[in-house]
Image (cartoon, grey):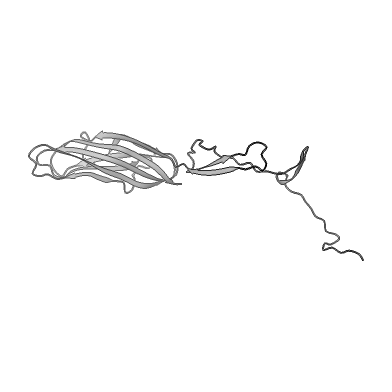
Amino acid sequence: MAGKCGCGSGTALRTDPSACNALTRGASGLLVPRTVLTGIAPGGAVSTQRSVDVDVTAPAAGSCPETWTVGARLTPVSGQTSGAVSLDGSPANTWVPVTGAQLVLPEAGVYEVIADVQGSTAWGVGVTNAIIDARIFDVTASVEVLLSARRIILFTDQAAQSTNGIQANASAGALYQVAGPTTIRVDGSWRTDSGTTTQKVVWATNFRFKKISD
């Protein structure tokens, strides 16, 4: 009795893999295709183009089986600075850049930007509503960083009979999204409803940013 098989007499198996996926005959036998991973070495430089870096550790040469170790670490960009400016020579209701308090957000993304600010002012008889304000300003786009403005000082002492002074602190900050490298700075401003003030200063004791999202 003749044997039967499930294949037609005219069927032939065809094997024609791509060169990168084919077995290769070598002097020591068949060579199997392999994938080589690349990345940043553990503890290597932090990328300025992304917030997560991938670490790849290759197996020892000739090891069998090959074991690759792959890990990831958060590497959000950040920076900080400080500065100060006297407002005595500036008109009321005018925003004045705080000298030294300028930073560059290096890439697109969402940032937490915070300025710990301190203000001081002094006044004599007849002053009402001595005010010192601060804000974070986007120099690149020429706009105020939304929700960053803060009132550092609002003080009224109509009964003052001699020179008085005050210092106060505030934190000006916001979440801010940018489309590319962006320069930001801290500004200060002053005004009164009546009378004369002196010794008006705004400090940015710590002005900082940290990227929180790509």
Q: Residue at horizontal 79%, vertical 53%? A: 14
Instruction: Answer with left or right where residue 123 lies relative to residue 146.
Output: left
Across and down, in percent, residue 18 comes to 72, 47
| Count of numbered circles in the view | 0
The image quadrant that residue 118 belongs to is top left
Q: Name the quarter where the N terminus is drawn.
A: bottom right
Across and down, in percent, residue 94 comes to 24, 40
Q: Is residue 45 visible?
A: yes
Across and down, in percent, residue 6 comes to 82, 63
Across and down, in percent, residue 44 comes to 51, 36
Q: Is residue 95 visible?
A: no
- Closer to the camera, 115 or 5? 5
Question: Which residue, as the protein is rendered here, is positioned at the far front?
Answer: 64
Q: Residue at horizontal 62%, vertical 39%? A: 59
Q: Residue at horizontal 37%, vertical 45%? A: 112
Question: Which residue, as the protein is rendered here, is positioned at the far bottom?
Answer: 1
Instruction: Answer with left or right where residue 61 lies relative to residue 82.
Output: right
Instruction: Answer with left or right where residue 136 lies relative to residue 105.
Output: left
Instruction: Answer with left or right where residue 44 lies relative to residue 14.
Output: left
